[in-house]
Amino acid sequence: MTRSEELFERARRVTPGGVHSPVRSLRGVGRTPLFIERADGATITDVDGNRYVDFCMAFGPLILGHGHPAVREAVLEALGRGWSYGAAETASLELAELITGRIGWAESVRFVNSGTEAVMSALRLARAATGRTLILKFDGCYHGHADAMLIRAGSGLAEGAVADSAGVPAGVAGDTLVAPLDDDELVAQVFTERGADLAAAIIEPVPANCGLLPQRREFLEHVAKLCRRHGALLIFDEVITGFRLAFGGFAEVSGLVPDLVTWGKVIGGGFPVGAIAGRRALMDLFAPAGPVYQAGTLSANPVAVTAGLATLRALEDGAVYRRLETLGRDLEAALAQAPGVWLQRRGSLFWLLATSPDRAGIVRSKTRIPADAGDGYIGMFGRALENGIYLPPSPYEVGFLSAAHSRADVAALAALCGG
Ligand code: PMP
């Protein structure tokens, strides 16, 4: 028995399923979890002393890699001044000023502790701003585990959404509509039927939670136009893409501007930070400026926002994004002709499908994911692990490149997956 296996036995006795977030169980790839002892640069090391080049990167926050010196230094300095005040402090002010100064349409920002919390609060704000109840989401997007978002498509389009988790009341599920991605007509139909009651449409502009499902620009413009026409707010959930595709996320890359954005992951540099941002008039609906209650004991925790600030400062000049694009292109080029593997990529986000390219084509919606993609990935994950590479531990989680990866790391990944 390995040490990881021993620890997992212990963990199962005291924690549901032995883990504190389901995908960490490695069930999706038919394994049990590795217990990680340390992480540095592009690598993680488990308690059995195995070292892996990490392409999961904590599921996204670590765009600079593990243990980046500038972040570590800033965090240690902040720690020396105490780590929670429950009072106003300057680190969150500087982070808010950096963000609003760089992203013109994000005039005001509220910090929270996670992406889930950001989405939950953004939805409440949208409902308050519009005086409406319904929320539209898209099948294949994930927005955290607030009740209203744990909903999947049911049989009828504009009404039949059903809870995707036990414990979500039918009444809550009934207030969320689900439309398919990449289907202009069906989305238009939802707006025609229910547009007058829609508070908001929420979408990951580059859906990255059911594989990577890049959307056509026209589709996103179509959704934005429908929102405007029907008086619903458009929320971009950029928890993954924010500060990753560019400093201003997908909105910067595309020029498409939402009414509200939700951020997480990179904004905290690996510490628990999420955020909601948008124009001041909307954001001022949040308490204490306005009537929408929103609060948190640990919100804008000084150590966490200091990590975020150090991370975003390292991204400001754009060099990291250029480097990540080079690494991404390397991976793409190396796998372009590889049999039995299909890569979808946007910037430093990549999705490896262990299936034949000729059957795949660009996959833009959940229903078009090849049925054999999951099974093939299990073998790929195992092969990678045996060769010192840690891939995302599920066929439907995307991989992350970081500034700490080398071109040799990417070449090794490509050789393994394509070979
Ligand atoms: N939105 C998106 C797009 C996400 O990818 C995630 C997490 N993967 C969330 C929301 C929820 O964020 P958190 O896990 O920090 O609650």
Image (tube, grey):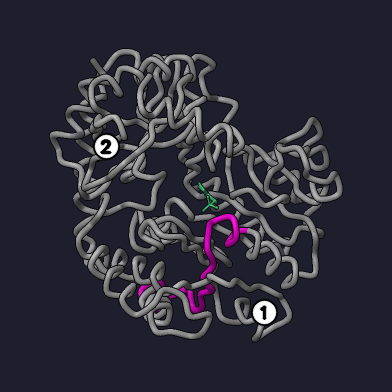
- The answer to which image quadrant residue 249 occupies is bottom left
Quadrant of the frame with the C terminus: top left
Task: State which tag comes first along the sequence, 2 or 1.
Answer: 2
- Amino acid marked by disc 2: Thr
- SS at mark 2 in the image: strand
**Residue pointed to by mark 1:** 285
Q: Position of residue 204 (x, y in %)?
A: 53, 49
- SS at mark 1 in the image: loop
- The answer to which image quadrant residue 340 occupies is top left
Q: Residue at coordinates 40% horizontally, 70% vertically from top-left?
A: 305
Q: Position of residue 219 (x, y in %)?
A: 55, 45
Tell me where the magenta segment starts and ends, as one range. Answer: 101-119
Report the side of 55 relative to 237 (left or right).
Answer: left
Q: Residue at coordinates 66% horizontally, 73% vertically from top-left?
A: 294
Q: Nearer the viewer, mark 2 or mark 1?
A: 2
Q: What numbered label is drawn on residue 45?
A: 2
Q: CA distance from mark 2 to mark 1?
A: 46 Å
Q: Answer whether residue 262 is magenta in the image.
A: no
Q: Answer whether residue 104 is magenta in the image.
A: yes
Say if 366 sits above or below 378 in the image. below
Q: Position of residue 48 (x, y in %)?
A: 29, 29
How many other residues sit within 10 Å of disc 2, few (<14), some (14-19) or many (≥20)? some
Viewer-side residue, 12 vs 232: 12
